[in-house]
Structures are given as C-alpha cells and as structure tokens.
Amino acid sequence: MKHVAFFALALFIVPSLSAQECKPSDTIAECWGKFNPLPTAAATEAAATADAENTEDTTAAAPTGITNVASPSESSLKDFLSLLAASMESATSSEEGQAFTFDWNPPIGFAKAVGVKLQASFAETKLSDEVTKKLADADTIEELNDSLEFGDDTTFSGLMQPRNMYFGRSIDAHREWFRRLRDAVRPNTAMENDAFQLAQDALGIVSARPRFDQLVDANNQPLSADDVTTRINLIVAEARRVQARRTASAPFFEAFATLLNNQPQFYGAVIYHARKNVIGPNEWSAKFTYEFAGNNLNAFKGAHPRCADETEIALTCAQELQSFADAIRPGIERLAVSLEYHKVNRRWISDPDAGLDLGFPRTRSFVGSVAFGTNMGSMLPFGTAASGAGGARLDFTAKYELPEDDQSEEKGFVGTLTYTQKISDTFSLPLSFVYSDHESDLLNVDKRFSARFGLMYKLPDLKGLGFTR
Amino acid sequence: MPPCGALVIWTSVPVGSKFLLESDGDCGTYDVSALVSMNGSPFPNLEHADICRGTAAIDIDGKSQRWTIEITLIVMNKLSKGVNLEARIEDAAGNVIQVPDGTGGTEPALCQWQSGTSAGSSLEIVINVRSVKS
C-alpha cells in the first residue's frame, strides 16, 4: 500500500514539475526551445559554464591571424576557408608603414582536391631610401612623393594546396567516413517520432506557434488547466528525448571538428612584388610551407586503422574519436615550416632632370622560417558570449635570411610575436612585436625593435555577386 | 512573421505538395543532413550534396502522412558568418502553401534559421509535416 501511495505521489509530482518548466503562457516552440535552443541562445547558455568555455577555446579556430605572406607578422595558420578577407597592417615605429590586403579563395568546381588563394597587398607608397639619399633637393623629393599613387607598391600572390584525406581542413575529403560515424551516433528513431505526431494529432496540436493557453478543444472551447498541463507534458517529454540524443552526440561532432581543424596543410605560393622604379626593384618569390598540429584525423586513423573503413564498428569508432580529441590539452598548437627562394630584379633609374642615376642590383636569397601558433582566451574585454567573439590567438615566427652573397649585411634573424584579438565575427585586431638583428628589404624590417598593429576584416558571403559556389 | 523555433509543425498539407530544404555558404565548411521518417518507418536521409547549394525534396504524395524531418547542421570550420538554412513546402505550381497557425488563421510554410560560426557547433531542427487526413 505504501508503495502504491508513493507511486501515485510520484505520478502527481513529476508531471507538475514538468509543467513548471514550461508555462501555459509559453508557445509550443518556446517550450521546446528551453530544452533544444537555437545557436544564438545556445551560445549564451554554454558560455555560463566552464566546460562549455573550454570547449569553445579548444574547438573554435578563432582568428587566424595576419594572412599577408609578405608580412613579418604572418600567421602560422593559413585561412584558406574564408572566401574573402581584407586586412590592414600598420607599423607604429617611425617608418609609418601601412599595407592593405585582399584575400580571395576562389571555388574551383572542376578540382575540389585543390584549394586556391589569391592575394593582393597594397602597401603605402614611399620613395626608396636609396632614391631619397641621392636627391639633395627637397622640392624634387616632394614632387616625386606626390607622384606616387595607390597601387604603385603592390604584392600579388597565388597559393595552392592539395585537399585530400591527409592534407587540408575541408570536410569534403572525409564526408563519407563522417557520414558513417554520424549515422551511428544519431540513428533514426522513426517509431518514437511517429508516436509524438500521433499524440499531437490526438490533442489537436496543429502548429508550434500558439501558446499552450491559446489551444482549444474539438468544440473550439478553451482548455481546462489539466488539459493544458497534458499538452505541456507531451511537448516537454519529447523535447527531453530529443535533448538527450542531441547532448549525447554533440561531443562527437565537436571532437571531429577539432581533429579536422588540426589536419596538416601543405601549400606552395608564388609572390610577385611590383613597384614603381623610385620605390624600389621588382621581386619574385617562391615559397613552400608545411603546417601541422599533433592530434588530427590522420593521427586518429593511424591509431585506429579499422575505423577508417569498417561500418559495423562505427559507433565504437565515434566514441574512440571523441576520447582521442578529449585527450588534447586546451590551447591547440600549430607549427608551420617554410622555405622561400627570393629574387630581386636588377633595376636602373636614370633621370638627369631629377638628378637620379642609380641602380638596384640583382640579388638572390633563401629564407627559412618556423612559425608557432596557439588559440588562447581573450586578454582584452571584447566580444560577447552570445556572438562567440572574444577569442584570441598568439603566433610566434622566427625567420633566417641567407643571401646568395654570404657576406651580405642582409643575413640574419627576425623574430615576431603577434597577439590577435577577435573583436567580432568579422573584425580582428592583430598586435605584433618585431625584433631584427639586421636590415632587410625582403623581410621589411630595419630596426632592432618595432611594433605593428592592424585591423582584419572578413567580408561577408558574396552570394549576390556570384563569387560563391 | 515571427522567427521559427527548433520545432516546426506544419499540418493539413495538401497531397501533391513538396517539402524543400536548402542551405547556403561554403559547402566545404560544414555538413548538413536530415533524418527522415514517415508513419513510423525510416526513409532515406536527405544528404549534404542535395541540401547544400541544391534543393533536397520530399514529395507529400498521400493522405494521412506524418513526416518527421530531423535536420542536423554541423559547422566544421570557423566561419565569419553563419550558414543559412531554409525549409518550405510548395504546391505543384511552386508557391509556398499556407498552413494552420494554431490560432484559427494560417501562415506560410516557410522557415529560415542561421547556424553558429564556431567549429563544432550545431544547428538542429525538428520538422513535423502532416498531410490532410483521409
């Protein structure tokens, strides 16, 4: 008897508690949304917990840093997947250098295995130091300066990378495999879905728009409080079921994205620096870069070779993939190694009226660099949890320049530390500190210490202009 | 029209209508799919290739059909802007149909959502579609 009484009490209490989670004044969609919110509300909810913030730091590849290949502040993470981005960079030293950069990743329909990035960087135009030294007349210097126009100092670059199962961060090469794992963690629940719809139909629920207290019976009469509670309980029960499935599978999706974003990238670039003669000589570069992070899909498949092909163990593999990603400590580190061949074209400037008669010699050099980057929490009070902004990135780059003439004064080391703060979904603020033990036109440094700041803006989807796939 | 939530219920859908689902953005940066079932039986999924930049469709070809479409969109790479997802039901002429709004009126069977931008984030929608009864 005591057990019957307890059970009856439980039946009374549990439905009442469920009804309190959703109110009669809630719409059906609002009630559902308390258990299964849309992304904006979900970001706010997740930001309230430390675990969710750690997940955001781990999985969100926040700002990718400065992508200008000609900049000493260049990030170790090439953003091939932003369709169009523009960045502005400014040196705070007395050089007063500025560069405005456009990035574009054109979709290549016939070669999905290739990622292409085209870039144009427009530097602030100023006369070459050699030219200003040769000119004694300040009026002539001013006249030449005034003749310079936007675009007289431009760097064009084309970058290409393979995208397949082993290189590149696009899901395309992994989609079939991901689909098998996804279907294992999120199976079809057809029977339960139909039971929910039959119950809706029996209770006269024909839309998710109305409030519970607006629902009517078959005679178009307002419902009693108990009938309203019955409908609330139905929606809450199904919302909880869907919530349980969603929260059970979400860690797998986050883990897969984490490992995908750690995939190595290998890319080659050709860079042409076109300058008006009084600004400096034209230059060519060919650069090859390899960047990688330790824990990625390649490493997972190597540790679990059966998971790459076999469908019957897909659920086990999804769980193992999640454990593999969970083992990564926060603050993903990415390393980039590059080798560059650089050639400066010979150029002679002869202008008797201006008193110019000088030449730039042809030179060749090699540059090796190592870049290390990591996502981190924001050090500045920018962004909101709801928008997902507020992340930051730290990049360190070390470059060594070796001219063809080994005795050249342009042999030496340049180190750069860049902090990039995300302000919003489209704006990021990079701040760099640069040390160089030599002067270098190639690496665009001529002081021991300098600081640079910039503004990065990622343009929106250009669907209307036909630039998107 | 107020925005749609994560649960959508469209009823009294005429036979001969078509449920359509599409997304935009860079297809290589996310994965979108939909589990489909009707009257308690699973149907083939709507997959990414059909949904992204194309139009995935389900024919509402009989009375008393109860379709459940569970959409899952996973962002794989950090995005500057969320992916837009749109679901609608059209008649044979290509016009969006009107469905009961639960308060005696009607509303267009058309919904749009936007995903988050963080890698690993998901957008999940449940759509219940019921055709006219026999």
Image: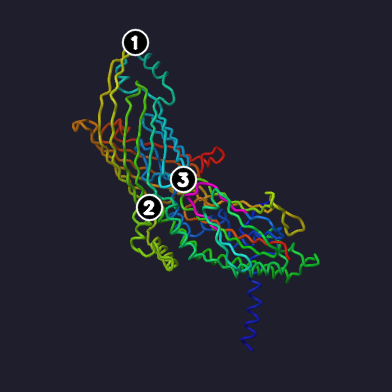
Estimate the x, y position of residue A44 in percent, counting from the top left.
Answer: 55, 55
Mark 3 chain: A
- Residue B100, compared with residue A266, is above or below; it is below
| Residue A422: image tag | 3
The disc, 1 or 3, on the residue closer to the chain's N-terminal end is: 1
Estimate the x, y position of residue A333 in percent, counting from the top left.
Answer: 36, 52
Please tell me whether residue A157 belongs to the stretch shown in magenta. Answer: no
Q: Which type of secondary structure does the marked residue at label 3 adopt? A: strand
Q: Do the residues at discs 2 and 3 belong to one chain?
A: yes
Foreground mark, 1 or 3?
A: 1
Foreground mark, 2 or 1?
A: 2
- Horizontal side of A354 relative to B84 (left or right) equals left
Give the residue type at disc 2: Gln
| C-alpha distance separating marks 2 and 3 | 23 Å
Determine crowd level at label 2: few under 14, some 14-19, many 20+ residues with C-alpha closer than 10 A.
many
| Residue A138: image tag | none
- Horizontal side of B102 relative to A81 (left or right) equals right
Q: Specify the segment rendered in magenta.
A: B20-33
The disc, 2 or 1, on the residue closer to the chain's N-terminal end is: 2
| Residue A263: image tag | 2
Give the residue type at disc 3: Lys
| C-alpha distance separating marks 1 and 3 | 51 Å
- Which residue, as the protein is rendered here, is positioned at the far bottom? A1
* Residue that carries the numbered disc 1 in the rendered image: A353
Estimate the x, y position of residue A13 in percent, counting from the top left.
Answer: 64, 75
> Where on the picture, by quarter, is residue B64?
bottom right
Estimate the x, y position of residue A30 in percent, counting from the top left.
Answer: 65, 59
- Residue A355, compared with residue A325, is above or below; it is above
Give the residue type at disc 1: Asp
The disc, 2 or 3, on the residue closer to the chain's N-terminal end is: 2
Please tell me whether residue B21 belongs to the stretch shown in magenta. Answer: yes
